[in-house]
Amino acid sequence: MGARKRNTAERRKEATRDNYQAILRNCPTSPRKMRLVTRLISGLEVNKALDVLKFSPQEASRRLEKVLLSAIANWQSKNEGVRVEESKLFVKKISVDGGRSLKRLQTAPQGRAYRIRKRSNHVTLVLESMNKEVEKTTK
């Protein structure tokens, strides 16, 4: 590996060291429906976001709740000995991108066929702490 490539890899590694995220790929929900739920929790504190997702009737909220719990677990693995309540974690960024679409045909009148697109999405959730001093003392 060349020096330039090594330096770039080290910079990328440094940038992701303080990045606590979870990614859900190929979730079988349309991106439009998932974005409705993600707007509910964007910018909220983690405990409030979990409460909102738990009592939300949409199916996408169950999947998003698991992603949020995974991001919290990723944060805990990097910051051992620090409680979530003390660090004041919040949802910094959440993005929903379109995944692959399964293309199907449905029979229609007079020998025709209608195309059905079963959409999926990719969700990326990034957490950040308001109290960065608490985390730096434990490292």
Image (spheres, rainbow, N blue to C red):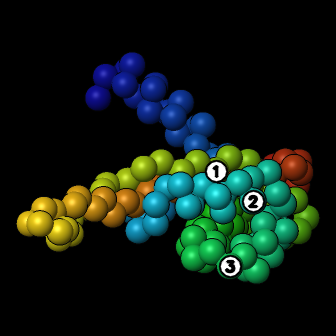
The residue type indicated by label 1 comes to: Ile
Label 3: few (<14), some or many (≥20) within 10 Å? few
Question: Is there CB contact under 8 Å for labels 1 and 3?
Answer: no
Question: Is there CB contact under 8 Å for labels 1 and 2?
Answer: yes
Residue sitting at the far front: 110
* 129 relative to 14 in the view: left or right: right
Which residue is at a point 28% across and 62% down the rendered structure image?
116
Task: Note whether residue 25 is visible.
Answer: no
In this rendered view, identify the residue nearer to me: 61 or 8: 61
Residue 45: x and y in percent read 84, 60
Q: Which of the numbered marks, if any, corresponds to residue 41?
A: 2
For numbered disc 1, what is the local secondary structure? strand
Residue 74: x and y in percent read 62, 64
* 58 relative to 28 in the view: left or right: right
Distance of label 1 from label 2 (alpha carbons) = 9 Å
The residue type indicated by label 2 comes to: Ile
Distance of label 3 from label 2 (alpha carbons) = 14 Å
Which of the 4 image quarters holds residue 54? bottom right
Which sits earlier in the primary sequence, circle 3 or circle 2?
A: 2
The residue type indicated by label 3 comes to: Pro
Q: Which of the numbered marks, if any, corresponds to residue 94?
A: 1
For numbered disc 2, what is the local secondary structure? helix
Distance of label 1 from label 3 (alpha carbons) = 20 Å
Q: Which residue is mark 3?
A: 57
Q: Which of the numbered marks, if any, corresponds to residue 54?
A: none
Residue 60: x and y in percent read 57, 70
Which residue is at a point 15% across and 62% down the rendered structure image?
113
In this rendered view, identify the residue nearer to me: 92 or 38: 38
For numbered disc 3, what is the local secondary structure? loop
